[in-house]
Amino acid sequence: MHPAAEHSPLGKSSEYIATYTPSLLFPIPRTAKWAELGLTAQTLPYKGVDFWNCFELSWLLPSGKPVVAIGEFSIPADSPNIIESKSFKLYLNSLNQTPFADTASLEATLVKDLSAAAGKPVGVRVRSLKEVEAEGVVALPGVCIDDLDISVSNYEHPRPELLRCDESRIVEECVHSHLLKSNCPVTSQPDWGSVVVEYRGAALDHASLLEYIVSFRQHSDFHEQCVERIFLDLQRLLKPEKLTVYARYVRRGGLDINPYRSTEEVQLPNHRLVRQ
């Protein structure tokens, strides 16, 4: 468990506070998890963002009438802190009985509070249900590898030694799997996700990638660190000219978390999948 997470509200009984309380946000430094992967803030080999989508966002108009919406938050991958997910939910719940003059005022408050917790500017979009409904759901890009016939016996921790590639062949491709699962390092509850790998480099053996993804099944870690681990293991193996890894996780507590890591400066999409 991350040492800071022991003091967070995750896994503990919490009082429901329905009026604005920014102190509920609980930042967790990324440094300890970066150190586990041999990284520091100065040596990150990727760019990226963590998209958080909130489906339980509500507040009051000055008249007292409630509003519901969907919140989209983008936290830079190199921010000093992640925000512990239960504290994020508790903070958002504290807006439920809080009046705001308009949506712009709400967004400004969210930007201020979330940026202070993350340690870097956080992007915020408050979106109407109609807007999000019109977008619908999308399919992941590339080839799905889930139907490959593999034998699996490793579930307890990631096994990068399972990964294989053909160094004599350089390819550019995109593949994905819906079989990513890990466990929360604090509560041990399951986290379900879909993962995309897009790269140009030595040809990756798809069956070995699927075996590797399944090896996360009983692994305990935060969403962000699972994606960073996959990125680093593939980078070491493929020595790619470019590499992007991202995961779309199923929501818990009205929030889903979607980490993106890439060697490129790309405009990353935040489209919902069928499980989201």
Image (cartoon, helix red, strand yellow):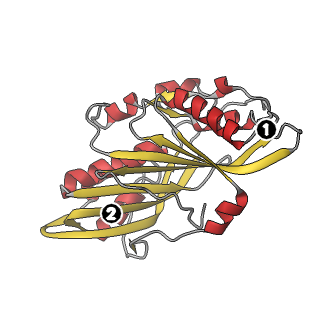
Residue at horizontal 54%, vertical 28%?
117
| Between 117 and 215, the one nearer to me in the picture | 117
Q: In this view, does 245 lie above or below 208?
A: above
Q: Is residue 92 visible?
A: yes
Q: Is residue 86 above or below residue 207?
A: above
The residue type indicated by label 2 comes to Glu
Where residue 46 sits, quadrant-wise, is top left
According to the image, label 2 marks what residue?
198
Horizontal relation, residue 225 to residue 183: left or right: left
The residue type indicated by label 1 comes to Asn
Residue 225's x, y, as percent? Answer: 41, 42
Where residue 17 sits, quadrant-wise, is top right
Q: For the residues carrying marks 2 and 1, which lies nearer the camera in this image?
A: 1
Horizontal relation, residue 268 to residue 185: left or right: left
| Between 116 and 39, the one nearer to me in the picture | 116
Residue at horizontal 72%, vertical 31%?
13
Q: Is mark 2 on a helix, strand or loop?
A: strand
Residue 116's x, y, as percent? Answer: 54, 26
Residue at horizontal 46%, vertical 54%?
217
Horizontal relation, residue 7 to residue 203: left or right: right
According to the image, label 1 marks what residue?
96
Residue at horizontal 67%, vertical 46%?
253
Residue 187's x, y, as percent? Answer: 59, 39
Distance between mark 2 and mark 1 Cα atoms: 40 Å
Q: Is residue 192 above or below residue 66?
A: below
